[in-house]
Image (cartoon, rainbow, N blue to C red):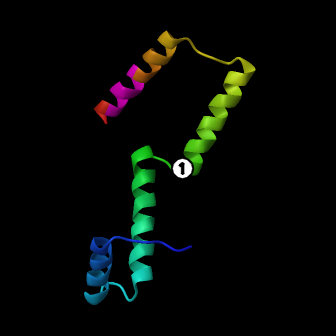
Amino acid sequence: MELTITPELESIIQREVESGRYETPQQVFENAVYKLKQDDDDKLGMTLAEFQALLDEGWEAAERGDLVTPEEARAHLAKVRSELDRG
């Protein structure tokens, strides 16, 4: 895989290497990608694989006809929000 980066990003990467924090530009890039993935996982509260598994589970339930009404869904979401607000 080849990537083209902006001069600004190249400068940032070079400064990180020159600081001694990283030995190579590759390490800077890898760290950035891992942090991006971690941020995404943190936002979801789960990994993308876990989120996909929940989506699959919901889809399978819908295909079986195991559905809830919009009112039931809203009530459940209100309960979850309330519990999250309480910590």
Compared to 31, does 72 lie above or below? above
Report whether 38 appears left or right of 20.
Answer: right
Quadrant in which the C terminus is drawn: top left
Amino acid tagged 1: Leu
Identify the residue at image location x=51%, y=12%.
70
The secondary element bearing badge 1 is classed as helix
Report whether 25 appears left or right of 66.
Answer: left
Residue 79 is covered by the magenta coloring: yes
Mark 1, residue position:
48
In this orientation, which residue lies closer to the viewer: 39 or 14? Answer: 14
Count of all numbered marks drawn on residues in the image = 1
Residue 44 rendering spot, x and y as whole percentages? 44, 45
Compared to 6, does 51 lie above or below? above
At label 1, counting other C-alpha atoms closer than 10 Å, the crowd grade (few under 14, some 14-19, many 20 or more) is: few
Identify the residue at image location x=26%, y=82%.
15
Identify the residue at image location x=44%, y=16%.
74
Residue 80 rendering spot, x and y as whole percentages? 41, 27
Quadrant in which the N terminus is drawn: bottom right
Residue 80 is covered by the magenta coloring: yes
Residue 39 rendering spot, x and y as whole percentages? 39, 55
Identify the residue at image location x=74%, y=21%.
64
In this orientation, which residue lies closer to the viewer: 86 or 68? Answer: 68
Compared to 77, does 18 lie above or below? below
Dominant secondary structure, magenta: helix
Q: Which residues are magenta?
A: 78-84
